[in-house]
Image: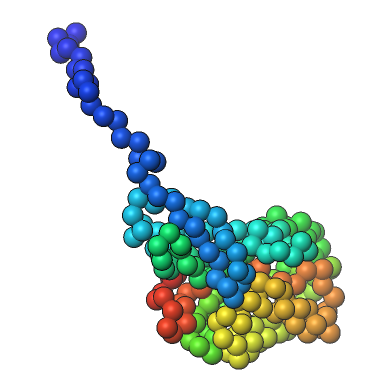
Amino acid sequence: MSSRRPTRKSKGKKVVDKWKEKSWYEVQAPAYIVEKSLGDTPASEPEQLYGRIIEMAKLGVAEDIYYDINLKIRFRITKVEGNICRTEFVGHEVAKEQIRSQIRRNRSKIEAIQNVTTKDKARLRVYSIIITPRRCGTSTQKVLRKTIVDIIRATCRNQSFVEFAQNMVNGSIASEIKKAVGKIYPFVLVDVRKSKVITLPEGKAATVAP
């Protein structure tokens, strides 16, 4: 049995509440997506905020009640001005549950993952998906995959980062793909299901993702 006596905490030792040492900063969405506050975030020092990711449902950053609550939009804090955090769009993702609900037996799932570059030299990784109501052959799948890859590549090449981000979020690019795919084969789902910004355009913050 140890003869060591239990130590006591020093009398009068002050316990520091780390939360009380933090300040709260308001996070603003970039105006090209929506002019809206994304809420507040805490930090002990402003430097700790840089690079922090804020994720919100599309309904949470837009006034249009018809916006899809299954779409998550991601923003990265790139600048701190006083107690205001400025952000850039760094990606979006359709809820996995929404995609899974359409994947059933005897249906085909065609996916495409591609790196694209906007006309102002932003680089993004874009994930697209088509789900057909019945199984389709390998040759048809290749045609469908090439169709979505070509549309996204051409659209991205001819648009600025801001335009491309807006059109992914508002569904314009998905609508263009639907028109093209519908002429080739029936579908139950066509969407740009996810995007990730690899590099922001020239003049903005540097690389944001591997």
Question: In which quadrant of the rendered view does residue 195 lie?
Answer: bottom right
Q: In the picture, which quadrant includes the C terminus?
A: bottom left
Residue at image coords 72%, 74%: 171
- Side of 133 where 121 appears, left or right: left
Question: In which quadrant of the rendered view does residue 4 lie?
Answer: top left
Residue 101, given in percent of the width and then of the height, sits at 76, 56
Q: Which colour scheme is used?
A: rainbow
Residue at image coords 49%, 68%: 87
Of 187 and 124, nearer the camera is: 124
Residue 119, placed above or below residue 111: below
Of 101 and 93, nearer the camera is: 93
- Side of 182 where 164 appears, left or right: left
Residue 48, given in percent of the width and then of the height, sits at 36, 57
Q: In the picture, which quadrant includes the N terminus?
A: top left
In the image, farthest residue toward the front: 82
Q: Is residue 56 visible?
A: yes
- Side of 15 where 121 appears, left or right: right
Residue at image coords 81%, 63%: 106
Of 111 and 115, nearer the camera is: 115
Residue 202, given in percent of the width and then of the height, sits at 43, 84
Q: Is residue 135 visible?
A: no
Residue 31, given in percent of the width and then of the height, sits at 58, 73
In the image, farthest residue toward the left: 3
Query: In this figure, what is the number of numbered marks?
Result: 0
